[in-house]
Amino acid sequence: MECALLGAEVVIVPGSIKDCARALRERQKSEDWFDCSTLREPYRLEGKKTMAFEVVEQLGWRVPDVMIYPTGGGTGIIGMWKAFEEMEELGWITGRCPKMFAVQAAGCAPIVRAFGEDADRAEEWADPKTVASGLRVPSAIGDFLILRVIRQSRGGALAVEDAAMLDAVRDLSVYEGLVTSPEGGATLAALRRLLNDGFLSGLETVVLFLTASGYKYLEVMESLVSNRTE
């Protein structure tokens, strides 16, 4: 609705984001379109680097110990790692880079599966299901880059259930005053898992990325409010 209001032609494609990409490519040449989807052009990757710059700057040029990022196409993780490498080359930071953790939905976790199997590429996830549409990505074009980053950083990949995401969305709203999307909630759910499983001690500086507003998910917010009032 938002895109249509802004004047865009919106085409609904049944299936996942991969089916949308297939439909785009079928029309791309005949209609002279430019493909600006994930990692098909350089500019989004360069823009994602600014997240790493801003985190380090706002921490007084200290590098956090851990970054937890909701990962679908993975541009954020890839771009931020590029930024850390560049900051190290420039001498802006020294010593170490953060451990990068990719969090996915239990109903669509190709990177998590590939990481657990010590594979270099992630096979397509069959029948992806999750309330977090940004995580409903059955195969990522940059899968090998995502896996390389989380291994180089000594981080990891983990999947969380939708219910845990939504519990975290509610808690972030109540305790932090931040209305975030399910993808953002996934990062808090992942942090809780990492603490409970002993991967983190609780003394680290950890950055969670809340990548979208909860107002992009009005139907999810309605369900959270109705469940709370019943």
Image: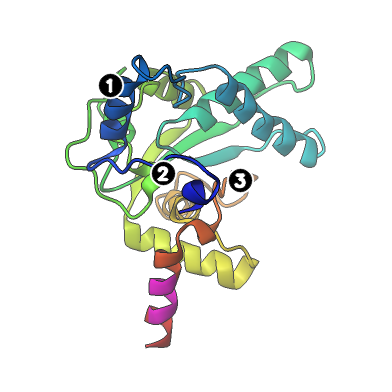
Query: Nearer the observer, disc 1 or disc 2?
Result: 1
Q: Position of residue 55 (x, y in %)?
A: 71, 38
Kindly report the secondary structure that dominates the magenta region of the rendered protein: helix
The amino acid type found where label 3 is placed reads: Val
Task: Give the left or right position of residue 26, taking residue 42 as reference.
Answer: left
The amino acid type found where label 1 is placed reads: Glu
Q: Which residue is mark 2?
A: 134
Q: Position of residue 16 (x, y in %)?
A: 27, 39
Indicate the secondary structure of the residue bearing disc 1: helix
Q: Residues within 10 Å of mark 2 (few under 14, many from 20)?
A: some
Q: Can residue 2 be seen at all in this image of the molecule?
A: yes
Whether 192 is drawn above or below 176: the answer is: above
Question: Disc 3 to disc 2, how far (Cα)?
Answer: 22 Å
Whether 153 is drawn above or below 71: the answer is: above
Tell me the quarter of the picture where residue 114 sits: top left
Q: Which residue is mark 3?
A: 206
Q: Are marks 1 and 2 in contact (CB under 8 Å)?
A: no
Indicate the secondary structure of the residue bearing disc 3: strand
View extreme (bottom): residue: 230
Which is nearer the N-term, disc 3 or disc 1?
A: 1
Which is nearer the N-term, disc 1 or disc 2?
A: 1
Q: Which residue is mark 1?
A: 26
Question: Disc 1 to disc 2, how far (Cα)?
Answer: 23 Å
